Image: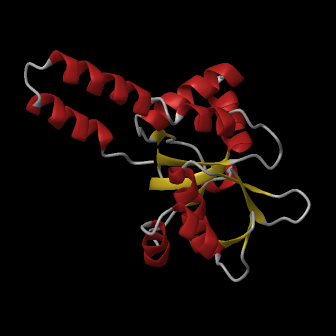
Amino acid sequence: MESQFPSVFYVKLIECGGNSNVHSFLMVLLFLFMGQDAPFYNKVLGDYRRNSYFVAVGVQSDEYTGLTIIENDNLYYLFNRIKGYDKEKYKAFMKEQLLNKINLDLHGVNLKKSGFFKVATITSVEEQASKGLEKFIGQYFRGKVIRGGIGAAERNAVISKLFEFGVAAYIDDETGYLAISR
């Protein structure tokens, strides 16, 4: 989730000048806010089932630079294969990449064969997301399952927005439909 809080806090810290109580309070809020993604990342990055949660992450490769989605188990197996990462090292590495919004350097990796899907900017998805999480989910889901009639590009953009909102999405084993876990 792209956040404006760190830059806002930075500006507020400059404005409050020498008031150490305000400075201390704002620093505590900043550290609390920066840690709010950790439980979500732990949930998503700790799922190694066959149909695990999707991860939305930027990549740089020979064929594409931009936002992608991939199931966590596929991403873990890729890093296990090319870097030798065990689950703990993978999880720590990915948390750092996601928290710092660092693109994965995947030169020499075939993105499609590895399970990556490119995420295009879809205007209707952006518009729905701007209305807030509940309206967004109401637009695209019936309960926990995605509504019918949504194409692949739009579905990928929806998964990416859900990830930004901190909502885990996965392919349900029984139905084969995209579902959410809140």
Residue at 71 percent across and 43 percent down: it is 74
**Residue that appears at 88% across and 56% down:** 173
Number of marks in the rendered image: 0
Residue 138, image quadrant: bottom right
Residue 40: x, y in percent? 60, 38
User: Looking at the rendering, which quadrant does residue 162 occupy?
Assistant: bottom right
Q: Is residue 140 left or right of residue 121?
A: right
Residue in the image at 47% along x and 54% along y: 67
The structure's colour scheme is secondary structure
Q: Is residue 109 visible?
A: yes
Q: Please tell me whether residue 89 is drawn above or below residue 102 in the rendered image.
A: above
Relative depth, front residue between 69 and 40: 40
The residue nearer to you, when weighing 163 against 77, is 163
Q: Between residues 104 and 51, which one lies in front from this camera angle? A: 51
Spot the residue most to the bottom. Answer: 149
Q: Is residue 60 visible?
A: no
In the picture provided, is 20 more to the left or to the right than 56?
A: left
> Residue 27: where, in percent of width, then height?
29, 23
Query: x, y percentage for residue 71?
Result: 69, 48
Q: Position of residue 20 (x, y in %)?
A: 17, 16
| Residue at the outermost right position | 174
Residue at x-position 41% and y-position 33%: 33
11 left or right, relative to 182: left
Instruction: Work out whether 147 lies above or below 69.
Output: below
